Image (spheres, rainbow, N blue to C red):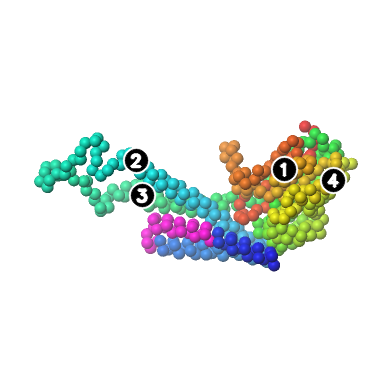
Amino acid sequence: MERYIQFIIFFIILFSVFGFVQWYVFRSYIRWLASTVSAHAFHRFRAAGLIFFAFANILFILRFPSTELGWYQHPLFQALVIYPGGIFFGALVLAFILLLAINGGTGLVRLSRRGLNRLSPFKMAAGSRTDGSSPVPAAGPGSADTKSALPMQVDTEPAASSVVPFTHGLTRRQFLRTAGTAAITAPVAFTIGASAATAHDYQINRLRLHYPGLPSGLNGLRIVQLSDIHSGIYMTEKQMQDIFHLANEQLPDLVAITGDFVDNSPSEIPALYRSIPELKSEYGVFGCLGNHDHYASGPMVASALRQQGVRVLTNDSQTLHINGESLTLLGVDDIESGSPNILRMEQAVRDLPQDDFRILLSHRPDLFDIARDQGIDLTLAGHTHGGQIGFEFMGVPLYPIHLFHHYAKGLYEMDGHKLYVNVGIGMVGVPVRLVRPELTVIELTNRA
């Protein structure tokens, strides 16, 4: 019952925010129409916009029952409902941000102009002269200077010159029409293009991590790390099988999965349950739970994985004996509320062997600071997705995720302790990933 209450609260918040975003975008669309098209065309385009928004909302809403009923697994439903609905959501949010920036910039310009006009030293009292001389006396009706003394007459009728091109041969209306069309097209084109380009364009990142004191029996040990699979509307059973086969091709000695096996519903567990046996390694498959696993049901996800041979580490550890050496794997559960991280770490490191090599599986990378104090050699984490949106421009990294996470993506090292933050292989929210989904192959070495 508690999950359904959370589900209802989530939907109320989601559709309230999403409703406001749609109202803001549609209002801007109506204002643009009013300034660029005729009255007859205005009504046609307004009706077309209403029909489009209504149809797109139906697609967006259908994704939610499809999760519970399993419809999302069918390729036709994916093509006609899941991805169009997700692209609509992503394009609308992007349009909202774009409009906020445009309207905010326009408002600042207007305020600046008003401020400058008020502070202008050239605005004088009525009738004053800037040279300090007396005002020119008004000429009488019969004076020869009457014409020069009268203010300039302004013709209130539109003149032919009023249709002078606004810029580069465009009238003001044509310019607004062109700019508005571009503003409408850009978010949709960007979202579709980004979805098609990288959503399932898996990259394999290969790392050789040097540890001078690494036991010789562990030299060359190969670990394949996966994270944030998110079994659900954007990660079907077939797609998971393809990913697991790709992981097997890397010939891993062991596999580590750092949380978020499912997206947010117990109905997404069966597809994971059926596909996870495809994943093979010499010394086993290990994992820890993420926050989305708890959104669905942490105990149910852990139970399904354990039934299929995955060793889920929940604030505990397991020591492996490899080539005569000891390797201890630790796993920390992800609970956003409840016991603090430090207590869960203390529980996980209890009764550890003193001299073995230690690897921590933690969904969230911010446990790295605690892990170093506990003598953890390598921490593997995920959670951030690299922000899903981010890129490099002329060699400059532009990843907004760095504003929210100190350890956002990639490799970090402090005092010989290392952290690798995998950007994940699945998606949440929208089917867009400018940060390519990742499968990491880590090789441990004691050779420089």
Q: Nearer the viewer, residue 415 or 216?
A: 415
Task: Give the Cα distance between marks 2 and 3.
Answer: 31 Å
Q: Nearer the viewer, residue 153 or 92?
A: 153
Magenta segment range?
19-41
**Which residue is pictured at 75% across the width and 53% down the height?**
333
Is residue 85 left or right of 274 when viewed as pictured?
A: left
In the structure shown, which secondary structural element does the residue marked by tag 3 occupy?
A: loop
Q: Where's the C terminus, which quadrant?
A: top right
Residue type highlighted by circle 4: Leu
Q: What label does residue 171 carry, if any?
A: 3
Residue 172: % across, % down:
37, 50
Residue type highlighted by circle 2: Ser
Residue pointed to by mark 2 = 120
Residue pointed to by mark 4 = 352
**Which residue is pictured at 31% across the width and 50% down the height?**
163
Q: What label does residue 219 carry, if any?
A: none
**Does the magenta stretch mainly form a helix, a strand or a loop?**
helix
Residue pointed to by mark 1 = 369
Residue type highlighted by circle 3: Thr
Is residue 179 left or right of 62 when viewed as pictured?
A: left
Task: Give the Cα distance between marks 4 and 1.
Answer: 19 Å
Task: Give the Cα distance between marks 4 and 3.
Answer: 76 Å
Please tell me whether mark 2 or mark 3 is closer to you in this view: 2
Residue 426: % across, % down:
67, 52
In the structure shown, which secondary structural element does the residue marked by tag 2 occupy?
A: loop
Residue 156: % across, % down:
25, 53
Asked whether the viewer can see residue 80, the reply is no
Q: Earlier in the sequence, mark 1 or mark 3?
A: 3
Is residue 58 left or right of 385 when viewed as pictured?
A: left
Quarter residue 420 falls in: top right
Question: Is 256 within the magenta?
Answer: no
Tell whether label 2 touches label 1 (CB within 8 Å).
Answer: no
